[in-house]
Image (cartoon, rainbow, N blue to C red):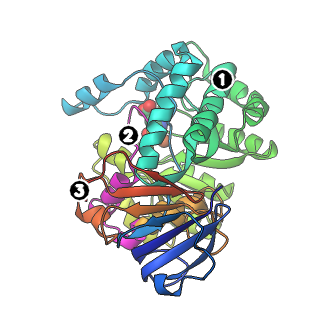
Amino acid sequence: MSDLVVRHVGRLTTWAGPRLSDAAVVISGGVVEWTGADRDLPTGLSDRPELDAEGRAAIPGFVDCHTHAVWAGSRRDDVAGRLSGTGYNPAGIAATVAATREASYDDLLAAAALRLTAMRDGGTTTVEIKSGYGLTSMDEARLLTVGRDAAAGVGLTAMTTYLGAHVVPQGREHAEYVDSVIADLPLAAAAGAQWCDVFCDDGAFTIDDARRILIAAGEQGLGTRIHAEQLTNTGAARLAADLRCASADHLDHVTAADAAAMAAAGVVGVLVPVASLYTRSQRWSHAALLRDAGVTLAVATDCNPGTAWCESMPYAVQLACLAMGLSIDEALRAATLGGAAALRRTDVGHLSVGARGDLAVLASDHEVDVVAHLGANAVWSTVIGGQPRRASAVQP
Ligand code: NIG
Ligand code: FE
C-alpha cells in the first residue's frame, strides 16, 4: 500500500460529489486522503511520489464483479459454430472442464495471470473470480486457490466464488452431484471462497437445486449470487430476491415482475453485455427494464472461454451504452460503484476520502471517450492502492 499524489487530472470522477477539473488525489498508505483542485493541494507533500496525469480524465478503478477467469484450453470451435448458426449450449462447458482438469497448477496460474494483467491494463482494480471448470472437490478448490494467487500476483483485489454448480459434470448423476456440491461448501470456504454462485438454467441447475445450494451456502457463511434468466426465465431472479442474494447476474430474460422483486430486496442486477453479444442473444432491453424498476445495476465482463472471452471493462461499458442504452454515467457508475455493491464492498468503486486509492487514469481528457473511441486502449495508467501501473501500449 503506497503513498502517491495524482496531479493535474483534467476531469476527476469520484462519485462523492460533482466532477472536479484540474484535480489532484492524495493517497496515503493506499487510501484516499484528499481530493480537490490541484491548486488547493495541501502543503507538506513535496516528498511524495507523483503521477502527473497531464490533463487526462480519471475515474475510480473498475470493479469487475463477475468473471470466470481461471480456465485452460479453448472454445474456439463453439465460437466458429455460432457463426454458422449454432446456438449457445452449456454442454460446451465440459470441454473446458476436461482441459482445465488436465492443466498443471503452474499452467493455470500463468494463464489466469495473463488475463488478470489484461484486466488491470484496462483499468480493473477489483475482480471477482469464480471456480466452475473443475467440478470435483479437489479441482474446484484448486481453481479457487489459483484465482486468489493469480490476483495477488498482479496486485488486484480479488474475491473468489465457488461455482461447483456450474453444470453437472459428465458421468455424474444430477441429484447426487447437487448433494456433493453442498457437501463441498466447507472445502470451498477453506480454499478462500467468500461467495457461492449457481448457474440456474436449462442444461444446468433447477430452481430447487439453486435454493438448496444457496441456503446451505448461507449457513456456511458464504455470500450468495446467482446466474439468472440467461437462456430462459426460470424464476432465478425471484429466488435471488427471496434469499436476499447480493446479486442476480445476466438477466437477459428477466421480467418486470422479477425486476420489481429484485429492487424491493436490494439485489444488484449484474449486466454482462459481452455474453449477450457473444451468444448472439440479441437481447439488450433487460438493462432498461431493470433500471426503470429501480434495481442497482452493475456491469461486468463475465470473462470466460464460452460466452465472453474478454478481459476489458471498457469494452463491457461500450456495449452497456451502445447496445443496452445506458448513459455514460450510468454505465461507468455500474462498472465501479455497482460492481462494489454486487460484492457488498464499500471501500472500492468510488474515490471518497477513506476509500482505497484505486483509479483508472484514462487515455483521454474526457470519460465519454471510453465509449466514443471504440477499439482503442481507454486507460493510460491503473493506480492500485496508490501504486501506478502503466499499461504496456497506450494510444493517445
Ligand atoms: O457466465 N452461464 C454460465 N456460465 C458462463 C459460461 C460458461 C461457459 O460457457 O464456459 C457464463 O456465460
Ligand atoms: Fe457467468
Foreground residue, 15 or 3? 3
Give the vertical position of 144 relative to 261 (above or below): above
Magenta highlight on residue 145: no
Foreground residue, 44 or 62? 44
| Distance from the alpha carbon under mark 2 to that under mark 1 | 26 Å
Looking at the image, residue 142 sits to the left or right of residue 260; the answer is right
- What element does badge 1 sit on? helix
| Distance from the alpha carbon under mark 2 to that under mark 3 | 18 Å
Q: Quadrant of the N terminus?
A: bottom right
Quadrant in which residue 33 is drawn? bottom right
Magenta highlight on residue 311: yes
Which mark is nearer the camera, 3 or 1?
A: 3
Instruction: Tell me, yes or no, if residue 373 can be seen here.
Output: yes
Give the vertical position of 227 relative to 349 (above or below): above
Label 1 sits on residue? 177
Instruction: Answer with mark 2 or mark 3, whichever residue precedes in sequence.
Output: 2
Name the residue: 40% across, 31% down.
305
User: Residue 169 at x, y = what percent?
Assistant: 55, 20
- Which amino acid type is shown beneath numbered disc 3? Leu
User: Residue 14 at x, y = what percent?
Assistant: 51, 74
- What element does badge 3 sit on? loop
Foreground residue, 88 or 322? 322
Asked if disc 2 is less than 8 Å from ligand 1, the answer is: yes
Name the residue: 42% across, 56% down.
381
Which mark is nearer the camera, 2 or 3?
A: 3
Q: Which residues are magenta?
A: 304-331
Disc sitting over residue 332 in the figure: none
Label 3 sits on residue? 374
Instruction: Answer with mark 3 or mark 1, whichever residue precedes in sequence.
Output: 1
- Graded by Cα atoms within 10 Å as few (under 14), some (14 to 19) or many (20 or more), the crowding at tag 2 reads many
- Which amino acid type is shown beneath numbered disc 2? Ala
Disc sitting over residue 308 in the figure: 2
